[in-house]
Amino acid sequence: MAKRVEGGPDGVRPLAVGEVLHRLVARAVDLANAFNEVDRVAMFDELRLHFLELLPFFRCFYGEPSRLLLRRDSGDWELLQSSTGSRHGDPLAGFLFALAYHCPLSATCAAFPDVQLPSYADDTHIVNAPVRAADTFAHLQGGLATLSLRVKLAKCAVFSTAELPPAFPSPPSSGAPPTAS
């Protein structure tokens, strides 16, 4: 990324590093209610492909809709049936989510090999030139739809000293600076 020159203390010309940094954008992508909404069929399919020994566990805990109790403002309780997402308290919930999320994430990596996509749980960052990052974001959103997932724009952020193209989606402005989640 930086140009080596003779005579510098570490051989890196600071101006070259600055030029590269001024052309990059980092887009923080946060998924809305990801662990509760991820498609269970996608989790099952990935287990079937990669971890057959975990299928009995999955069938035991996810073979039928989860029963959730919801307390209404009136004080009454309502029984809900949930057929999406991981179960609360499941020690494998993060693993199952990551397994399903791996498909659209790896497809996006393959389509944009020059773009960096560091990810942890449901948080992903897209790092590259603004136009490439915008195209990558759109591609990732398409893949997320196959898992019944969506981006929560209000929790996304853009970090850049580069000029952003008009097509680059930005989170709605509330007038307040973004905060960490």
Image (tube, rainbow, N blue to C red):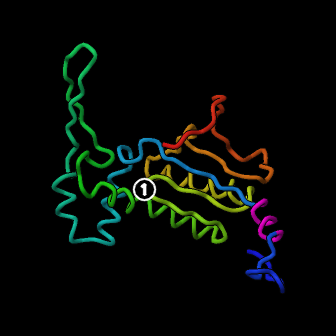
Residue 93 coordinates in the image, percent (x, y): 30, 54
Residue located beneath label 1 in the image: 121
The spot of residue 22 in percent (x, y) is: 78, 59
Q: Does the magenta stretch include residue 20?
A: yes
Front residue (pair 170, 24): 24
Q: Is residue 54 magenta?
A: no
**Up-down relation of residue 51 to residue 130 (above or below):** below
Q: x, y percentage for residue 108?
A: 57, 63
What predominant SS class does the magenta segment belong to? Answer: helix
Q: Which residue sits furthest front?
A: 9
179, 138: nearer the viewer: 179
User: In the image, is 132 to the left or to the right of 43?
Assistant: right
Q: Which residue is outermost to the bottom?
A: 6
Q: Quadrant of residue 110?
A: bottom right
The magenta stretch spans which residues?
15-23
Height in image: 109 above or below 4?
A: above
